[in-house]
Amino acid sequence: MTDLAAHTDSTPLGPTHHIPAELLLDYATGTLSEAWSLAAACHLTLCPHCRHELKAVEAMAGSMVEQIVPQPIADQDRAVAGFAGIAGRLGPQESARNARPVADPDGLPQPLRQYLGGGLADVRWRWSGAGLQSFALPMTRQRKAGGMVSLLKVAPGAGLPRHTHTGDEITLVLSGGYTAGDAAFRRGDVEIADPAVEHRPLAMLDQPCICLAITDAPLRFSGALGWFFNQWARFSA
């Protein structure tokens, strides 16, 4: 069992768990979903390494685009409006790519602040279990698919029940930290999980852990109380 007391929220070199290159490419080319684009933009705000990687990916993507023969778009006005809507919610992306880690009082990345309309003090947390509070962000498409886009606030030493995934999940640590098995995730780190991953995230002991968690399909709880948690999640969604 992982010794939670051995982990603290100190990461002098910045995030060590990064967005994979293929997701950076999707972000750079605008093909990433709104929810995952939000996670990517927030991570880029906090991670100098990935901002550097993004510049290389953008250069590669630009070279690829130059080789594509242009094709007419059937409904150009609708396409432009769709891209503009997502870009407007995320805010100016230049700040996410070049900015230093944010210095506002609660340390929220600016792209996330755009969605909240304020800081953590304005969040209306909802009790979601022992030591766990959540706040759902307004992304209808994600919820229709059975997924979620939520802020999670986990009390020190508490955690989510053991679970697997029926789709993909990305978790970005905004403050504090958590462990999952032998891995430790702190501010700015991302964890990406898929149906092959079973884990039980546990908050570190020194302070609450606040994360942005995005799934594109429901979680599937396992362990002795898995059936109970699956039923609870189904009726509380």
Image (cartoon, helix red, strand yellow):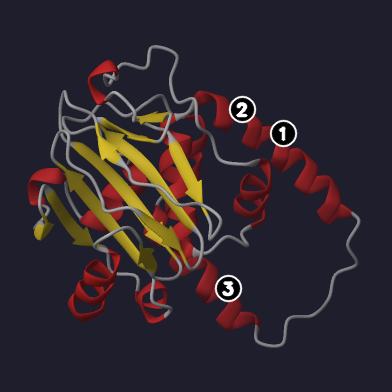
Residue 89: image location, x then y, percent: 38, 60
The residue pinned by badge 1 equals: 56
Using the image as rendered, state which of residue 108 and residue 8 is in the foreground.
8
Using the image as rendered, state which of residue 118 and residue 9 is in the foreground.
9
**Is the residue 169 above or below the residue 52 in the image?**
below
Instruction: Name the kind of residue labelled 2 in the image.
Output: His
Label 3, secondary structure: give it: helix
**Is the residue 163 above or below the residue 234 in the image?**
above
Horizontal side of 215 relative to 228 (left or right) equals: right
Instruction: Name the kind of residue labelled 3 in the image.
Output: Val
The residue pinned by badge 3 equals: 80
Label 2, secondary structure: give it: helix
* Comparing labels 3 and 1, the label whose residue is closer to the camera: 1
Using the image as rendered, state which of residue 206 and residue 98 is in the foreground.
206
Instruction: Name the kind of residue labelled 1 in the image.
Output: Ala
Check the picture and name the quadrant holding the N terminus. Answer: top left
Q: Residue at x 19, y 59 (%)?
A: 135
Check the picture and name the quadrant holding the C terminus. Answer: bottom left
**Is the residue 123 above or below the residue 234 in the image?**
above
Alpha carbon of mark 1 to alpha carbon of mark 2: how far?
7 Å
Q: Is there CB contact under 8 Å for labels 1 and 2?
A: yes
Q: Quadrant of residue 235?
A: bottom left
Q: Is there CB contact under 8 Å for labels 2 and 3?
A: no
The residue pinned by badge 2 equals: 52
